[in-house]
Amino acid sequence: MILPGATLGVLGGGQLGRMFTLAAKVMGYQVVVLDPDPASPAGQIADIHLKADYRDAVALLRMGSLCDAVTTEFENVPAASLDMLAKHCLVAPSPQAMAIAQDRLAEKTRAREFGCDTAPFANIEQAADLAQAWAQIGAPALLKTRRLGYDGKGQVRVNSLAELVAAFAELGHAPCLLEGFLPLEREISVVLARNQHDEMAFFPLAENQHRHGILDISMVPARVSDEITQAAQRMAAGLAHGLDYVGVMAVEFFILANGRIVFNEMAPRPHNSGHYTLDACATDQFQQQVRALCDLPLGDPRLLTPVVMVNLLGDAWNPEPRWDVLLNNPGVQLHLYGKAEARPGRKMGHYNCLAMSLDEALAIALKTRSELGIGED
Ligand code: AMP
């Protein structure tokens, strides 16, 4: 066990790194953040902020020698950097698990292997693969880049082979997956923690709604049956176990009208759809990340109150939202990430609405949103 007083590191200084840093510091750890941005949200509050590139060997060596354990807050950390760190300190999740989460083909292939259902998909390495992939999947379909896609970026909906050819060019001829477009009834996510002894703790399922490809709100408890909850948790557990995953991970699933549960993707870290845990659970996902990393017993993930989480994107900074109006609602908890510059689509913060029922929490979420003047487009 790595006990309080030790030093933990996080690769990446965004909001997830910031909330990890806060949780670790509350528990009495020192925190080192590596992020090239001098104003990064996590760097602002870390004990030491190493302002260097993620491949910088000198910075990685320093981090490895300062830290007892290192984790990451984004999936695209170079594998070589994780390998380098692993020579000096504990690194979790493993470089192998990270590599799988970085590539949609590897991710979906392993998910199937470990018992998850997925949308039909075909691999496209080059233009010569397009016709075969189209013959296999057909309309309607989604073309997604295998790497570096997030928040709906790097994906195009296509309805014909001609559209597929154009979309592949639009995505720069990068390796892609062509996926069957499914009629979604709901989207849910399972956030779980697993430690080195294969113990797992599941946060309650979140039901997620997106706007323009970006998570907009999460509702908890999700409006799905106990059977769906258990089946989704079983699938997520199979994946975590199969990957020998250590840390917090999120698994996104689609629910179809016939009750089919379809794996979409995994995130090898805490997740935006788990931010509700900060105010609504006995243990939040960042404290759980600290616990899993340090091989402490996992905390109680129990839900204490119904909750709706609303994301605050840079689009709402026009001018900066009226925080006094938002804070007038006693059941609302505000979280801001310390980002100086607001840009459209940039995640600036979120707020959690707590109430005695989900309907009431949803009503507060929608009321505060309209008070803030965040549009319904
Ligand atoms: P992703 O980047 O894979 O998380 O996809 C972003 C969003 O696109 C998802 O949250 C869904 O709303 C939608 N989506 C992705 N894949 C599919 C699919 N195969 N069928 C229908 N909708 C999808």
Image (cartoon, grey):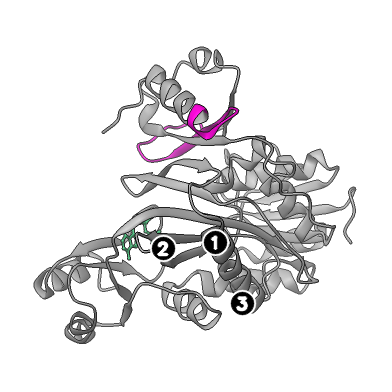
- Occupied quadrant, residue 55: bottom right
Q: Residue at x 49, y 69 (%)?
A: 102
- The answer for how far apart the CA atoms under marks 2 and 1 are is 9 Å
Towards the viewer: 67 or 178: 178
**Which residue, given by chain and number where applicable, does mark 1 sit on?**
227
Q: Residue at x 36, y 26 (%)?
A: 374
**Which residue, given by chain and number where applicable, does mark 2 sit on?**
259
Q: Is residue 356 magenta?
A: yes
Asked if residue 139 lies left or right of residue 221, the reply is left
Q: Earlier in the sequence, mark 2 or mark 1?
A: 1
Asked if residue 171 lies left or right of residue 268, the reply is left
Q: Is residue 195 magenta?
A: no
Towards the viewer: 91 or 349: 349
- The answer for how far apart the CA atoms under marks 2 and 3 are is 32 Å
Magenta extent: 339-360
Please provide percent x and percent y for residue 295: 83, 62
Asked if residue 337 lies left or right of residue 93, the reply is left
Of the residues shown, which amino acid type is indicated by label 2?
Gly
Please provide percent x and percent y for residue 288: 73, 52
- Occupied quadrant, residue 181: bottom left
Of the residues shown, which amino acid type is indicated by label 3?
Gln
**Which residue, given by chain and number where applicable, does mark 3 sit on?**
96
Local secondary structure at mark 3: helix
Towards the viewer: 222 or 195: 222
Image height of 322 relative to 160, above or below:
above
Local secondary structure at mark 1: helix
Q: Earlier in the sequence, mark 3 or mark 1?
A: 3
Graded by Cα atoms within 10 Å as few (under 14), some (14 to 19) or many (20 or more), the crowding at tag 2 reads some
Residue 43 seen by the camera: no
